[in-house]
Amino acid sequence: MDIGKIKILRDFCKKKGCHFFLSNNVKLAIKLELDGVYLPSFNKSFNHLAYNFKKKFIILGSVHSLKELNIKKFQGVKFFFLSSLFKKNKNYLGIYKFKFFENFDKQKFVALGGINENNIKKLKLLNVRGYAGISFFKKKGP
């Protein structure tokens, strides 16, 4: 991991007023004074709870099941990326299962997976804090 590049990105984000989160490395995120860290669903460690965080340090995490949701809550996650909403893969939820998560637990969910121009209006049916998607934001050809 190139710490110099991370510092350049951190400074750029700070200058532009954007948050910068490091994936799966809490210790380094704290050391470099980043805005927070992202814990993927496969990370089930609680070691980071021994560290001292700044008040504004945010922990993000992704979940695919209720079991993972409970683990992430114990890990101190504030915002949950709930995947996959529309993309039909092995973790596919769909709107109805997503609503079940919302009704089961009043957390701050961010919709993730398969979001495009055709189904983005369906997000209004859900109580999401935001949405994320790689293909949706990629620039289409010339």
Image: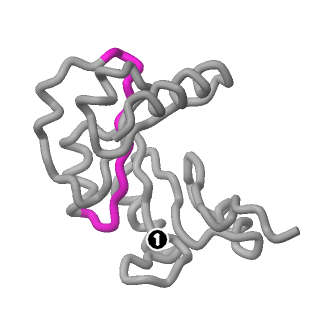
Q: Position of residue 33 (x, y in %)?
A: 38, 19
Q: Is residue 102 above or below residue 142?
A: above
- Quadrant of res 23: top left
- 118 left or right of 50? right
Q: Position of residue 6 (x, y in %)?
A: 45, 32
For the point 70% across and 70% down, the residue is 116
Task: Depth check: give the residue in front, 125 or 92.
Answer: 92
Examine the image and state in which quarter residue 121 appears: bottom right
Please check the rendered image and state whether residue 56 is part of the magenta-colored stretch, yes or no: yes
In the rendered image, the quadrant that contains the C terminus is bottom right
Q: Position of residue 31 (x, y in %)?
A: 29, 21
Q: Is residue 27 shown left or right of residue 112?
A: left
Residue 86 sits above or below residue 102 on the image: below
Three-letter amino acid code at disc 1? Answer: Ser
Q: Is residue 8 magenta?
A: no
Q: Nearer the viewer, residue 114 or 7?
A: 7
Query: What is the span of residues highlighted in magenta in the rendered image?
Result: 54-66
